Image: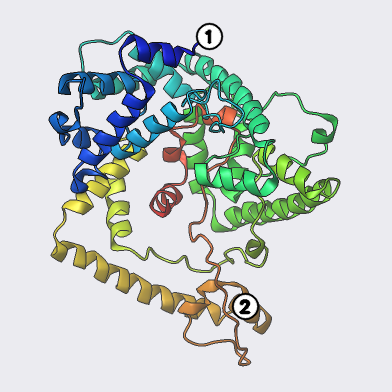
Amino acid sequence: MKKKSEDTMETEETGWTKADLQRLLAAMKDSIPNNKKMKSYISGLKSLHWNKVAFPPFSPEACKQKWITMQENMRKIRTLTELIVEAEDVIANPGCNRKGKECTEDAEGPPPKPPQSGYMLFVKEQMVSMTGTSRKNKLDVCGQRWQELSDTEKEKYCTNCTELNRQYRIKLNAYLKRFDIEEQQQILREKGIKTPKRRKGEECTEDEEDLPPKPPQTGYNMFCKEQLACMTGTSKRNEFNVCGQRWRKLSDTEKEKYRTNCTELNRQYRIKLNAYLERFDIKEQQQILREKGIKTPKKHKDSLVEQLPGEPKRPPLSGNVIFCQKQMKLLKKKIPNPTQRFAKANKKWQDLSAKQKEHYKRKVDENMEKYRMELQKWFETLTAAEQKNYLTRNPKHQYLKAKEKKGFVNKPNLSQPSDSEDDDIEFSEEESCWYSDQDEDEEEEDEEDAMFEM
């Protein structure tokens, strides 16, 4: 006699057949009011009338208890309607576990979930021993305990994070190999999956050794890496504090030197990367870029120029940015954490009246008028060739009143570069575990611009 599946045995033992379960779900779906169909799970469940759902030989209470049993292992951060649809799918295809395990060949499992950060591993470990308090209080306590850990203690969690990322990368690549390139890209895009980068110290193949190392993305990044190489005997956070202070003391000419060198390094890197990728076919190239976490440079960036010496920096285009920049400076001593400080500043902006916000909007107009005058004055100091180049390749030419000396007609450029002088520092993921507080250590103006743009 053929052995019954566990699902069939369970339903028969409780008196519920597969047909009964399907009828229960259909009755529940029909009983949800139209105005509650897209509400949250809790809201939708409260609107159900179990007397209308029940059918012989099951009482309303029996139907309710059966549903509670069925949804125990289901995610509830969805609408009740979506949960019922998933439950119908489980009954129709009992061979597939909704968590992606033990699926039949016909059932397609989801991609593996990315691992947690070192901090989240610490929080998960601490939460196990905490009882008798709300989740918010637990998280606050965990945050305080994490701040009290030394760099060595934090490194233990970062090491675990490294191993989990390695395993995740292997599982993700194995999953994606089932699809062609276009399907892979679609899956990554729809699921919002960011391809994990290889960490320092992991073994490389012979081909991988020829892969050019990624250079710093900005002049400030290059300066920091140069300074960090000769720093010893201090914590990582203090090192970045020192780097930020030293960077602010540099003259514009010295900063421009780093930016110029960085631009040249990135140009050479793109050439070497393209030469390396030419060894492989398109499919292998996509796989290499995905596995290494390499973002292909956008074509339009090659046609853009860096900010030229003496070129005025464009002011913020939003009153919110001006207000928050001011608050970030005022609250720096009271709230050292830049993320929390920005949240507080933004909350203050939301509390302003429309009349108060109008003041900052007028400030934007005043700053932009001043910027246009400064840009025009600077533009007129350029040679004819430099003016032609600026009008062709820099989208900020739209703020100029007069065009090129010889009447050059500029072509429209739809691309818009970032106007902040420096972006956030990019280091390996290994470094990023202890790098969470470094925003504060960057050049203050760049830190705030990057946060507002984000």
- Residue type at mark 2: give it: Thr
Q: Can residue 197 be seen in this view?
A: yes
Question: Which circle, 1 or 2, is nearer the viewer?
Answer: 1
Q: Which element is circle 2 on?
A: helix
- Quadrant of the rendered structure where residue 18 is? top left
Nearer to me, 319 or 239 = 319
Q: Is residue 334 visible?
A: no
Q: Relative to 271, is 371 on the left or the right? A: left
Q: Which mark is residue 432?
A: none
Q: In this view, does 403 lie above or below 112?
A: below
Instruction: Look at mark 1 in the image and give the residue it sits on.
Output: 3
Q: In this view, does 23 lie above or below 290?
A: above
Q: Quadrant of the N terminus?
A: top right
Instruction: Look at mark 2 in the image and give the residue it sits on.
Output: 392
- Residue type at mark 1: give it: Lys
Q: What is the spatial separation of the Cα atoms under label 1 and label 2, in whole angstroms?
A: 75 Å
Q: Where is residue 105 in the image (x, y as percent from the top left)?
A: 62, 28
**Badge 2 local density, few (<14 within 10 Å), some, or many (20+)?**
some
- Quadrant of the rendered structure where residue 413 is? bottom right
Nearer to me, 113 or 218 = 113
Query: Which numbered disc flags the more N-terminal residue, 1 or 2?
Result: 1
Q: Which element is circle 1 on?
A: loop
Q: Where is residue 291 in the image (x, y as percent from the top left)?
A: 68, 36
